[in-house]
Amino acid sequence: MEEIQYIGEHLGPRYIGHFAMLLAFFGAILSGFSYFKATHHREEKLRSNRWGRLGQLAFLAHGAAVFTVIGTIFYAMLNQYYEYSYVSSHVSGDLQQRYIFSAFWEGQEGSFLLWMFWHVILGYVLMVTARRWERPVMTVLCSVQVIIVSMILGVHFGVGDWVLKLGSSPMLLLRETIEAPIFQQADYVSLLKGSGLNPSLQNYWMTIHPPTLFLGFASTVVPFAFAVAGLWTGQHKEWLKPALRWSLFSAGILGIGILMGAAWAYEALNFGGYWAWDPVENTSLVPWLLLVAGLHTNLISRATGQGIRATYLFYLFTFVMIIYSTFLTRSGVLGDTSVHAFTEMGLEAQLLFFLGFYGLGSIGLMAWRWHSIPVPEKEESLSSREFWMFIGSLVLFMSAVLITGSTSLPVYNEIREYFNPLFDGLSLTDPEDHHNRFQIWIGIFIGILSGIAHFLRWRERDFSKHIRSFLLHSGAAVAGALFCSWLTLLWIDAGPWQWKLMLFSGWFAVWTNADYLIRFISKDVKVFGSSLSHIGFGIMLIGILASGANKRIISQNQFLMEGLSDDEELVRTTVILIKDEPMVMENYELTLRGDSIHGYNRTYQVDYKQRDEAGNVIEEFQLEPNILYDKTFEKIAITNPSTKHYWNKDVFTVIMSLPEEEQSIKAKEAKEDSLKYRVYPMTVGDSFAFKDTLKIREPDTFMIRNFALSLTDFKRVPTHPEYVAEAGDIGVGATVLIQRGRDTETYQKEVALVLREGLLYHYPAQINEIATRIKIDESVFDQLLVAEEELDYEEFVLKPGSTFTVGDKRLTFRSFKPQPEVDHYAPREGDIAVSAVIDITALDGTTGTMEPVFIIRDKTPSRIRDEHRELGLFSNLVNLNPETSEATLLIAEAPPRGELKIPVAVATNSSRSDWLALQAIEFPGINLFWFGTIAMLLGLLISMIIRIRARL
């Protein structure tokens, strides 16, 4: 079969990208091997330097290749080369350019490249700063790069029916990934459209959160590499100094990445909070906990020589847990248990190898060097600072173990089901309650330990000399923390005694660390970073208690919600808002004012009024929660909350439910099909009275309702609040009045019907107060539409005042009329329009008028014909000559038709859809959480900067 020669494919990026990926892969292998040889022959300086130089050059080439791969993908994305599978999956013509970065790392291949990008940057920094540790550390980094590059290599090896797939390439063409009839066409590229970025990810947080988080992930390889280098070279103390700086950096950046994720969840997700104990959230937190534990044992090891083994283990398994997190999110094992997990790519075997190689390798290295790692003969005193710091590290380790165990249930289930297919699996029924029940004690212990340790001294041998100072400051801290806790309890309800104890531990950490900072900042600048972090941790605990345990659901009006839903939680925590109907809940009055749609984003406007006990309005504001539809408008992709921020609280508002027809275009169509329309032919000025029956009780009890319907206006141009005119539209519009029974209110509404590119678009009027929908029936076009090609036009070139005949009718071109006001033309800003007024007289004396319009819109001339139905005439003004004042008219005769009857369709069983179910939550003290967490992470980074400057 002859091979198809495809037209329009852009294969340049494919060839460049594939070459760059191979170069990156083999460059990392060469660099890692060279650095390995340089380390292995470190005693032979000349030989080691030659290998080291080759390692540097190879890594520079590797980095350039990684940048080239990223550049080619961005080039294909920016130019919308949809023949590439990765571009087609993540980019579309309507994607805003500001989200191109988000689209790049939305997919697995892009996120792997982002990870590699940061490794390259970190590698370049290490080549300049690591000095004598460069070679062993870069050996480890290069080995990691080899494995990550293999994830996107896209190379297949096969022997017979056996095929080994090494990675999934982002440079594959769409026709190489799927089979479809479209690829039988040589010009298939011109028919392609991209799927685009998931609407739920079109958020500015998606632009800044992933790169920050991945920098945190990537940076954990550096303390890991230093730990491996220490074990490899046997220099068990020397590696601690450079590793500490990098662990401070990594803990700070990874923590900021996690905090950004929490802020994104709070701002853009609907679960009402900033942390949901999602499996992927958990697996990003665990490495951070281990890293913080490691940097504390690192400090102990540098000061006393104790805890070197623990420091090794913490740093090694920080990176191993990063890989484990990668395995969980990318292997598909989490299934539907996490909203963050990627879809499967068939890389499970490679991910397991990645995890096993470094996990088992770390254990093997520790076993090999265990007995050579120095351990001081004498244990530290119970009264020494390092003893309690080590206890604190163990508490963090226990926290990591508890979280990992619960998060790994899907892995356990997979293993059990492999051996026993009938195994149902284990799961947490309430993950939030489960984790909170245990982690509260972690917070309490760390808060208290971070305070106590500051009052103790390094390598304390004679505690009795300092017991008075210890008791004085400890007693003041306890009293201060109790007093602050009492004041806080006047503000919030702390709940059970465990939460009150956590409140005390938070204030104790703040008080003790502030005391320590004030006393020692002038003597030792290093205390600033650590004290700031611990103060931040204490404030964070208070913020968690205030905003989490003490959050207040204010969307409660259970009496009004009764019977509206079978969901008990929905009834308990939400209210139904109906447009323009105020709803009172606690000290707030809410009113739904309306909504607007821009692209896939639908925003609702909700007015808030806060009242005091006397009922007086003390504040008014508007919140705008919104929803994002998927690209087919078949479902809601995500709901985004809207929040009013105060210095001491937040008022958080999120949409929990909408009418079914507002969630899906198919549901909207199904509702429309279910309506029982009655069609009433009407002319302007006509009125109809009709009856309707409503079943109110089984078996056969009905209520009769009377309606009065009037048609007050009709135009041959559509007018409706939701109609946006497009070139080529043909449509009609009408104004109707309707009244039900003895209601005093009469409802005036506009309706329209538009024919656009062969499709009909209805613009009905929904009158929710009387559950009625009105529209123009499409049969109106049977009366109106006469194709131009069916008419036999005769051309006339005339001046105003000229008289001519068409058939047995005499016509007079009376005059030109600039900016005409007729029912078949709707003027727009910038239009230049002129009509020709034509008077008609028939043999029987019947008279009439036509007024065709000539229009220049957006520098393009066009015409709008007019007709006289009863006399059977059609007219077009096709040209006018301003120099001679002549008009070129086209006139055609057709069989006379009767008076136009507008078919007005009315359905009186249209339930209202102008409502939403809203949840509103008040988060008191949430800014304490944000402030405390930021302070904690800044303290880590400040400590790093201080140590770099002081060369500590």
Image (cartoon, helix red, strand yellow):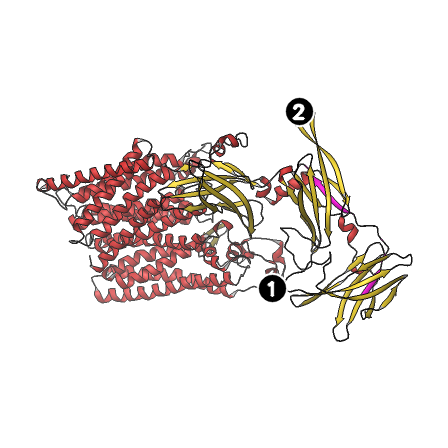
Q: Amino acid at mark 2?
A: Glu
Q: Is residue 447 above or below residue 196?
A: above
Instruction: Give the residue drawn at x 31%, y 39%.
Output: 401
Q: Secondary structure at mark 2?
A: loop
Instruction: Give the residue drawn at x 54%, y 29%.
Output: 563
Can residue 614 be seen here? The reply is yes
Question: Residue 645 location, x and y as percent?
Answer: 40, 47
Q: Is residue 879 above or below residue 480?
A: below
Q: Does the magenta segment cover residue 723?
A: no
Relative to 879, is 248 on the left or the right? left
Front in this rendered view, residue 489 or 112: 489
Instruction: Please give the residue where the numbered disc 2 appears in the rendered image.
Output: 698
Q: Which mark is residue 453?
A: none
Can residue 330 be seen here? The reply is no
Question: Residue 526 location, x and y as percent?
Answer: 20, 53
The answer to the question of whether label 1 and label 2 lie on touching residues, with beta carbons closer than 8 A, is: no
Mark 2: few/some/many CA within 10 Å (<14, 14-19, 20+): few
- Foreground mark, 1 or 2, reads 2
Q: Which mark is residue 5?
A: 1
Front in this rendered view, residue 99 or 928: 928
Question: Residue 658 location, x and y as percent?
Answer: 55, 40
Front in this rendered view, residue 166 or 628: 628
Q: Amino acid at mark 1?
A: Gln
User: In the rendered image, which quarter contains the C terminus?
Assistant: bottom left
Relative to 211, is 845 on the left or the right? right
Q: Does the magenta segment cover residue 893?
A: yes
Magenta-tinted stretch: 890-908
